Image (spheres, rainbow, N blue to C red):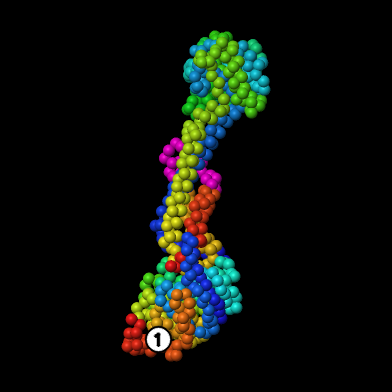
């Protein structure tokens, strides 16, 4: 009860000088608002990254022909990546669950009767279905027998089905690709659009052997998709693969690679956009603003202790103990930071809403920034409030009343 | 009630010791109205700080209600100030941001237990000093005399053993000063113990007894044969002239 009374005195001192109180909490307001916004952006980014990595496959490594750093599709003018490379990876790199070589042909005209469409063509092995976790929703998938017999079959995506067949049942119908007739044996599950805007469902999938020897007439691969059995080893496996292909292709760095390896880590880095370093830098800036706000508050409080010595002396003469005075001033600083925090949260929240409605920045509003803010407000209120409060409490009543 | 025995106070700073009180002894009985008089530098303010438990002597004994104040620590002295002493200062020391009523209630915050009838007590206190009408005013809207009476009401709220006033009229015009002195007189008649510290003989002569202090020792301690009557002074401006 007594402590409550003393705390109320601290609050009333604050209310009596509203402008002073506002200046004291300005730093806290800005700092907390920045913290809320930055954390929302950070969380939004992480969610985006998670989504991209999950789309990519968190356990998937892609070995892609052609150098550089780009994501698929492969550069099909580079002819050095071969089935033998894929076999070597399969044999020499441990703990790989799947090795799935593929040939790609980008935007090739496919026809059915009068209808035609430019579509992406993939030649795959049967394990492709598992490697991409992508199956047929209707009909049958690519089988080992299809591959062994170079059978003239294909699977189609939803877009191909709609464009070439409309309402017609595509199963058993023939699609012409480079004058080779392929019988549709299945329709693939829908995948939607890629982050880059490409249509995953505008796709024609056929046995890799059929693709290489009958349709495209190539003896090299576009890419190999690998699924690791041990995600913790993924980065090392990627390096092992790089070394293996270096050897097989007789490449010695700094000579440029004629292939590239994409891991979930790289995908995450690309999706992140703002780098982690920048994110941390912004967080540090927000914290600095909080600390500067705290220092400003401390100085205003120190001045106010000086200006209120008579009040302190009076309170001491009326029976306030040193602890009472200490608590009164600490209450003042804590209410400054806590109120500043509330206003800062409100401001940050408003800024988040505005950003979410007017920009493409991905934001996630969550409770964490508010929890962090409460902790910060308490810490800063205490840390920067203790010094003035101690100064006030240490005043000798006789000196204070002089 | 109050018993000072050979009270000494020596200020030490940077190796130089300045004795301010050099063995002050006197007693004040319950219900007395005493003035401690002396010129500036006589040590009367130091004496009042010690009487008010704001400061501790460097030697001697100070018994208040038979308890030795010299032995108490800071928190215990705070409690004594809260329960037994009602201060009235020259500069009033009212909180401008609070109403008269809240100002009077201020000491109750520091009481061991906040009384349920706090507001009623504050009202009674204000009635006692004749300010029943001014409860919701802020101090800066009151005259100096009224402000000092608010301060007296605040001093009364915890029903203290002694009222300790330090130059209570020092910041007031003569009429307001006499009004304040008449409040003291009335409180004295009700049986309160009052100690007024002043350099002003006119003020001192309202008390029943004057203790003269000079250079840290008591030079004179005697009853006032015929204490001045503030009521009469308020009626008759002639008598007030002496106050100037």
- Occupied quadrant, residue A304: bottom left
- Is residue B127 or residue B53 the one in the foreground? B53
Residue B32 image offset from top left, x and y in percent: 51, 84
Residue in the picture at 49% in, 81% down: B194
**Image spot of residue A362 (x, y percent):** 48, 37
User: Is residue A96 something one can see in this rendering?
Assistant: yes
Q: Is residue A173 left or right of residue A343?
A: right
Magenta run includes residue A370:
yes
Q: Is residue A303 above or below residue A91?
A: below
Q: Is residue A23 rendered to the left or right of residue B78?
A: left
Query: Viewer-proximal residue, B32 or A184?
Result: B32
Q: Residue at x 52, y 39 (%)?
A: A43
**In the rendered image of this protein, does residue A166 appear above or below residue A357?**
above
Residue drawn at x 52%, y 25% as measured from the top left: A200
Dot 1: few (<14), some (14–19), or many (≥20) neighbours within 10 Å? many
Badge 1 element: helix
Query: Which chain is indicated by disc 1?
Result: B
Residue A180 appears at what percent x and percent y? 54, 11
A399 versus A110 height, above or below = below
Identity of the residue drawn at 64% across and 11% down: A149
Residue B232 on the magenta segment: no
The x, y position of residue A71, in whole percent, is 51, 23
* Residue B155 against residue A322 in the figure, above or below: below
From the viewer's side, name the closer residue of A164 and A20: A20
The part of the chain drawn in magenta is A351-372
- Report the residue marked by disc 1: B230
């Amino acid at each position: 009860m007594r402590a409550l009374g003393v705390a109320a005195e601290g609050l009333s001192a604050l209310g009596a000088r509203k402008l002073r109180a506002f200046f004291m909490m300005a730093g806290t307001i800005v700092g907390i608002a920045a913290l809320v916004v930055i954390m929302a952006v950070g969380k939004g980014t992480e969610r985006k990254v998670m989504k991209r990595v999950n789309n990519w496959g968190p356990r998937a490594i892609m070995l892609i022909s052609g150098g550089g750093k780009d994501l698929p599709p492969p550069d099909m003018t580079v002819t050095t990546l071969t089935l033998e490379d894929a076999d070597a990876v399969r044999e020499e790199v441990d703990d790989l669950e799947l090795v799935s070589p593929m040939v790609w042909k980008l935007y090739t005209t496919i026809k059915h009767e009068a209808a035609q469409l430019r579509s992406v063509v993939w030649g795959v092995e049967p394990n492709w279905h598992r490697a991409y976790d992508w199956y047929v929703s209707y009909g049958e998938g690519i089988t080992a027998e299809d591959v062994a017999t170079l059978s003239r079959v294909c699977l189609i995506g939803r877009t191909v089905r709609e464009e070439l067949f409309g309402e017609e049942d595509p199963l058993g119908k023939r699609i012409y690709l480079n004058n080779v007739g392929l019988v549709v044996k299945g329709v693939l599950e829908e995948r939607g659009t890629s982050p880059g805007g490409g249509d995953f469902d505008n796709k024609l999938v056929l046995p890799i052997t059929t693709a290489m020897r009958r349709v495209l007439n190539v003896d090299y691969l576009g890419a190999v998709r690998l699924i690791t059995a041990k995600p913790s080893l993924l980065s090392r496996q990627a390096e092992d693969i790089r070394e293996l292909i270096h050897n097989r292709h007789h490449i010695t760095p700094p000579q440029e690679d004629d292939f590239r390896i994409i891991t979930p880590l790289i995908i995450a880095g690309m999706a992140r956009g703002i780098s982690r370093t920048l994110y941390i830098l912004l967080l540090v800036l927000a914290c600095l603003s909080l600390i500067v706000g705290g220092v400003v508050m401390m100085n205003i409080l120190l001045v106010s202790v000086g200006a209120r010595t008579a009040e302190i002396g009076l309170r001491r003469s009326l029976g306030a103990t040193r602890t009472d005075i200490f608590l009164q001033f600490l209450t003042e600083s804590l209410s400054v930071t806590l109120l500043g925090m509330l206003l800062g949260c409100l401001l940050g929240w408003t800024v988040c809403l505005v950003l979410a409605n007017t920009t493409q920045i991905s934001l996630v509003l969550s409770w964490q920034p508010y929890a962090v803010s409460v902790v910060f407000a308490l810490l800063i209120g205490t840390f920067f409030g203790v010094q003035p409060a101690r100064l006030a409490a240490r005043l000798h009543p006789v000196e204070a009343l002089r | 009630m109050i018993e000072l025995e050979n009270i000494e106070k020596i200020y030490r700073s940077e190796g130089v010791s300045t004795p301010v009180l050099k063995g002050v002894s006197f007693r004040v009985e319950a219900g007395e109205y005493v003035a401690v008089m002396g010129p500036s530098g006589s040590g009367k303010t130091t004496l009042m700080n010690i009487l008010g438990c704001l400061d501790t002597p460097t030697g001697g004994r100070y018994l208040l209600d038979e308890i030795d104040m010299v032995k108490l620590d800071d928190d215990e002295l705070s409690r004594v100030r809260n329960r037994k002493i009602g201060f009235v200062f020259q500069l009033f020391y009212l909180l401008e941001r609070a109403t008269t009523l809240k100002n009077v209630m201020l000491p109750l915050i520091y009481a061991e237990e906040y009384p349920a009838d706090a507001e009623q007590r504050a009202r009674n206190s204000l009635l006692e000093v004749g300010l029943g009408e001014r409860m919701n005013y802020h101090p800066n809207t009151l005259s100096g005399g009224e402000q000092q009476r608010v301060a007296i009401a605040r001093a009364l709220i915890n029903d203290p053993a002694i009222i300790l006033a330090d130059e209570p009229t020092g910041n007031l015009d003569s009429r307001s000063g006499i009004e304040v002195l008449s409040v003291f007189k009335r409180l004295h008649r009700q049986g309160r113990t009052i100690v007024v510290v002043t350099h002003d003989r006119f003020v001192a002569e309202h008390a029943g007894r004057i203790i003269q202090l000079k250079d840290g020792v008591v030079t004179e301690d005697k009853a006032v044969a015929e204490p001045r009557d503030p009521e009469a002074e308020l009626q008759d401006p002639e008598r007030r002239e002496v106050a100037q």
